Amino acid sequence: MRLILLGPPGAGKGTQAQRLVSKHGIVQLSTGDMLRAAVKAGSPVGLRAKAIMERGELVPDEVVVAIIADRIGQADAKSGFVLDGFPRTGPQAEALDKLLAERGLQLDAVIELKVDEGILLKRIETRVAETAARGETVRADDKPEVLKGRLDTYRTQTAPLIDYYGKKGTLKSVDGMAPIDEVTAALDRILSPAGAGSPKGGG
Ligand code: AMP
């Protein structure tokens, strides 16, 4: 199974991706996690990405495309993957199409987690407060000023992908503001063989 989860920061992509990993035996490919690991390791990619990420801007397309091209070729990704945080721009989506076509692979679904931005900001503020209260380090890019910029970036650069995948007919949407278990159940319905493409309703 090969999936993309689309949605702004704080929409719950990471949480749902982890659940999909356990349920379907696929791997989670989060470019954000991979870039944070690169920054921590001080690798050339990390050195290039660090300041950009701290400003809440996007790392250049060719950097993330190279990371994903390498990652989906690895053995553990053969049984499938859920992309979380990639693609984030039109050129990244086109590069992904090309990468998949070259390998004879197809996406099973692109799933948008629909959210209300006002509530989202509150949600991330809560996440930050809880992280700080546990004595853990708060992500530098979760600071309110940076977060607003990340949401703007999502709106201008990533949200157009909803239309891109909508036109291809691979897009499904779920209510990302619903409780976590309900979002998971909605994803299950989309991904279960009987649910794929069938009309809504009937419990
Ligand atoms: P995330 O954890 O997905 O919110 O990503 C954290 C940060 O990593 C983003 O704000 C970007 O700076 C960078 N990043 C992650 N994925 C991408 C991507 N696909 N394209 C460009 N930058 C990315």
Image (cartoon, rainbow, N blue to C red):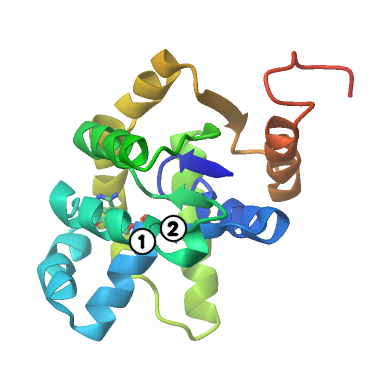
Q: Residue 71 carries which label?
A: 1
In the displayed structure, 167 sits above or below 53; it is above
Labelled pair 1, 2 in contact (Cβ < 8 Å): yes
The correct choice, above or below, for 58 with respect to 104 in the image is below
Position of residue 29 relative to residue 9, above or below, is below
Q: Position of residue 117 (x, y in %)?
A: 44, 37
**Image location of residue 178, percent across then percent down:** 68, 39
Name the amino acid type tagged 1.
Answer: Arg
| In-image side of 5 versus 190 (left or right) | left
In the rendered image, the vertical position of residue 73 relative to residue 2, given as above or below? below
Q: Is the CB of the residue bearing disc 2 within 8 angstroms of ligand 1?
A: no
Name the N-terminal-most of marks 1 and 2: 2
- The quarter of the picture showing ligand 1: bottom left
Q: Is mark 1 on a helix, strand or loop?
A: helix
Name the spot of residue 6 as percent of width and height, x first. 45, 38
**Residue sitting at x 51%, y 65%:** 76
Q: Which residue is located at x 61 percent, y 51 percent?
A: 16
Circle 2 residue: 29
Residue at 21% x, 56% y is: 66
Secondary element at image label 2: strand
Answer few, some or many: residues within 10 Å of disc 1's Cα (few below 14, many 20 plus, some between 14 and 19). some
- 76 relative position to 34: left or right: right
Residue 192 seen by the camera:
yes
Q: Nearer the viewer, mark 1 or mark 2?
A: 1
The residue depicted at 76 percent of the width and 40 percent of the height is 185
Q: Which of 65 and 52 is in front in this view?
A: 65
Q: Quadrant of the N terminus?
A: top right
The quadrant in which residue 202 appears is top right
Q: Which of the numbered marks, if any, corresponds to residue 40?
A: none
Q: Which amino acid does label 2 sit on?
A: Leu
